[in-house]
Image (spheres, rainbow, N blue to C red):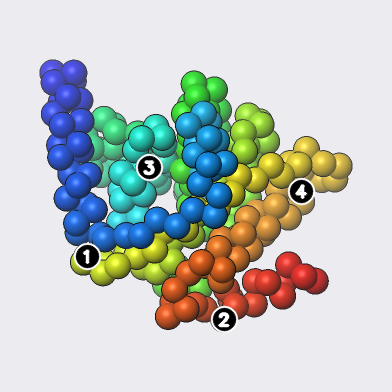
Amino acid sequence: MEVVIHVIVKIIYIIAIPVLRIIYPTKVVWENKAASQAVMKKSCLVYSNHTGYSDGLFMTSLLTRYNVYIFVGRDWYEKKKLNWLFRNLRYIPIDRQQMDTSWIYKGVETLEKGRSIYFFPEGHTSKDGNMLDFKPGFLMLAKQSGVPLIPICIDNKMKPFHFTRIIIGEPQYPNLKEEGRPSAVLKKYAAECKTSVLLLKKKYGNPKFATAESKAAEAKVAE
């Protein structure tokens, strides 16, 4: 029965992808398409800002050709109406309420199989358009697996039948094993990852959706 459900979910998902593209029209902008695609076809850690609840479903469908998996909060993963969907698609549960390290092992295992993982480092959706601080936990996967990072900026909140620009940045290879207290090193690079997303928004985003934070990104890098 489980196999039948899995096949049905896959068929529904394949049908849903073009429908999602109609409901959420987008323009994808690549900073360096050849370099980013080469990395994403192998194994990498993809991260972006988090504008709304539809981000996860849409972004995995947008990047489906790259076998991208995505972490989802266990509180959502275990909802009865959604669990059948999450279990049969590329979703990995993570407990945001308690100390849980199982997601690290599952994440490393997924990356070692040549797949990529998508992360929303903010942990929650931002309410006012300004990004929340990036939690450094997602970089533990990059540190243990040694895979490169791909930053993505969702230029504005996804709304049905409203145009959204998706900006995909160049591959990044941070030295996560540099000298220093591990937690401090990860926190430092998490802040730099947030700045990377803000810079993508500043350079390639629609000026209409610019924020004071994105406008100040270049000045922050220059410091």
Could you say which disc has been placed on residue 160 in the image?
1
Residue on which disc 3 sits: 63
Which of the two labelled residues, at mark 3 and mark 1, occupies the earlier sequence position? 3
Residue on which disc 4 sits: 185
Name the image quarter holding the N terminus: top left
Q: Position of residue 188 (x, y in %)?
A: 73, 55
Q: CA distance from mark 1 to mark 4?
A: 39 Å
Residue at the spot 50% in from the left edge and 73% down from the top edge? 130
Name the image quarter holding the C terminus: bottom right
Q: Nearer the viewer, mark 2 or mark 3?
A: 3
- Does dot 4 land on a helix, a strand or a loop? helix
Q: Position of residue 189 (x, y in %)?
A: 70, 52
Closer to us: 102 or 199 = 199
Which of the two labelled residues, at mark 1 and mark 2, occupies the earlier sequence position? 1
Q: Nearer the viewer, mark 3 or mark 1?
A: 3
Q: Nearer the viewer, mark 1 or mark 4?
A: 1
Q: Nearer the viewer, mark 3 or mark 4?
A: 3
Give the quadrant of residue 197: bottom right
Which of the two labelled residues, at mark 2 and mark 3, occupies the earlier sequence position? 3
The amino acid beneath tag 1 is Pro
Closer to us: 21 or 1 = 21
Which of the two labelled residues, at mark 3 and mark 4, occupies the earlier sequence position? 3
Give the quadrant of residue 105: top right
- Does dot 3 land on a helix, a strand or a loop? loop
Residue at the spot 19% in from the left edge and 56% down from the top edge? 22
Which of the two labelled residues, at mark 2 and mark 4, occupies the earlier sequence position? 4
Q: Position of residue 60 (x, y in %)?
A: 35, 43
Residue at the spot 39% in from the left edge and 32% down from the top edge? 67
The amino acid beneath tag 2 is Ala
Q: CA distance from mark 3 to mark 1?
A: 19 Å
Could you say which disc has been placed on residue 212 in the image?
2
